[in-house]
Image (cartoon, grey):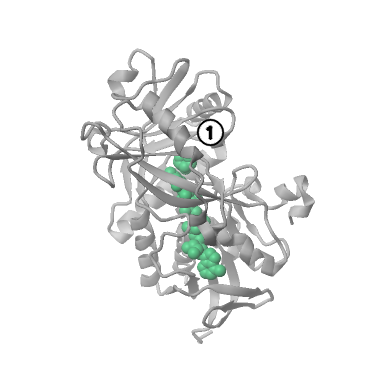
Amino acid sequence: MTSNREFDCVVIGAGVQGSFTAYQLARRNKKTLLLEQFVLPHTRGSSHGQTRIIRKAYEEDFYIRMMEECYKLWSQMEKEAGVKLYRQTGLLVMGPEKNESYQLCKNTMLKNNVPMVQLTRENFGLHIPNVSLAEGHAAFVELTAGVLYADRTLKAVQGQFQKLGGVIRDNEKVTDIKPGSLVTILTSTGVYRTKRLVITAGPWTNRLLVKTGIELPLEVMKINVCYWREKVDGSYDVKQKFPCFLQIEGEKSKEHIYGLPANEYPGMVKICLHAGSPADPDQRDQQKDRSDIETLQRFVSRRFPGLVPEPAVVESCLYTVTPDNHFVLDYHPAYRNIVIGAGFSGHGFKFGPIVGQILCDLSLGEVPSFDLSPFRITRFQAKNKSSL
Ligand SMILES: Cc1cc2nc3c(=O)[nH]c(=O)nc-3n(C[C@H](O)[C@H](O)[C@H](O)COP(=O)(O)OP(=O)(O)OC[C@H]3O[C@@H](n4cnc5c(N)ncnc54)[C@H](O)[C@@H]3O)c2cc1C
Ligand SMILES: O=C(O)[C@@H]1CCCCN1
């Protein structure tokens, strides 16, 4: 294949997942095209912004196993690109002592020997100043958790992809997909043919999948990303070793609240609800629901007395959520040369390097080194046949 319209692999969507997938394909000497509808970098999907949390604190063993491999891949990318992408801060996990999610998370960490320190009500204030632990709540700190620099990651990975000979075409929207042994891809400016296609289109995934005859049960949510100002400069600063945190609330993860130390905007701490309101990705800014902000104001005034309980900055980001909050990493049910990476449900960034490797393996017909049963499309079929 020599034409600049014909590729071994095409990846649709240059968010974190598509960028790492394209990079992995190029590393395996595949002639790869990464297509992006917007001019890069952009802020309209799920991967933009300065920071994300990286952690192993999960209720499921399989996420911890993936993260063990993934930390190595983050560090490889840092070395290869010569940039710092990860900063260790630790992650403070708080939750009602008898809450099932809290207990499961703690026990899964202990079982998997993830380095952690359990705090007591007596020593909590010593380790974590300026935070009140709620009545009846317990806490531990996961030591190797930290912050990932998100925008910097995308730039680094896309740069490494290009160094390997990969082609990025941005400002070029895919408008149609015609499956076949060679897949035909129509875009706003042209036509491409490829042996293998990977769809990592984030909140727009179903808009592309309908062109291939399926839809997945994905819900797009707009998240209000809130930053809260310190009353005294430095109280919650990353340089003072203030950690990221996760407050487990209720039995459903959409009641969880999380935060990151003051870092990207001096004097401001990012604290958000792990939930939002349904949105159309092309009309994101029409969704103006702020009820999550009221929940956060109550939380900040009760638990973070050193912050002004009124958000100083509110940005927007999109989640693409599956019914069980687990990802989709699978072949298209009808076409083996189309692979789908979607439904990252607001927690996929940290997995970017391993997702890239898995989607690349699937696309090349190789057996990935992880059990992908939690991520298969058939799990939705069992519950709801009409969703496919
Ligand atoms: C507020 C917020 C906080 C988060 N916090 C964390 C965290 O702390 N830790 C963590 O691990 N994860 C976190 N996440 C989740 C994580 O950021 C996402 O799971 C991840 O970014 C999803 O990446 P993606 O590549 O699937 O999607 P996207 O980044 O949306 O990428 C999809 C791309 O496809 C492009 N595209 C779509 N359709 C087309 C088309 N037709 N033609 C061409 N291009 C197209 C889009 O423009 C977009 O660039 C958070 C997410 C949000 C919103
Ligand atoms: O993936 C994460 O780590 C963050 C914090 C918890 C909620 C989802 N986003």
Q: Which residue lies at the image location 41% right of the left edge and 32% below the top edge?
A: 297
For the residue with label 1, is its CB less than 8 Å from the closest atom of ligand 2? no
Amino acid under disc 1: Glu
- Secondary element type, mark 1: helix
Q: Which residue lies at the image location 28% right of the left edge and 33% below the top edge?
A: 236
Q: Which residue lies at the image location 50% right of the left edge and 38% below the top edge?
A: 291
Q: Which residue lies at the image location 68% right of the left edge and 53% below the top edge?
A: 377
Position of residue 380 relative to residue 27, above or below, is above
Q: Which residue is mark 1?
A: 255
Q: Nearer the viewer, residue 233 or 330?
A: 233
Residue 119 image position (x, y, % from top left): 38, 19
Residue 281 image position (x, y, % from top left): 54, 58
Position of residue 337 relative to residue 283, above or below, is below
Residue 292 visible at all: yes
Q: Residue furthest left?
A: 233
Q: Nearer the viewer, residue 218 or 60?
A: 218
Instruction: Indicate the quadrant where residue 299 lies.
Output: top left
Q: Residue furthest top?
A: 122
Position of residue 99 relative to residue 368, above or below, is above
Number of residues whose C-alpha sits closer than 10 Å to that of mark 1, classed few (under 14), some (14–19) or many (20 or more): some
Residue 62 image position (x, y, % from top left): 56, 40
Instruction: Indicate the quadrant where residue 335 lies.
Output: bottom right
Where the N terminus falls, by quadrant? bottom right
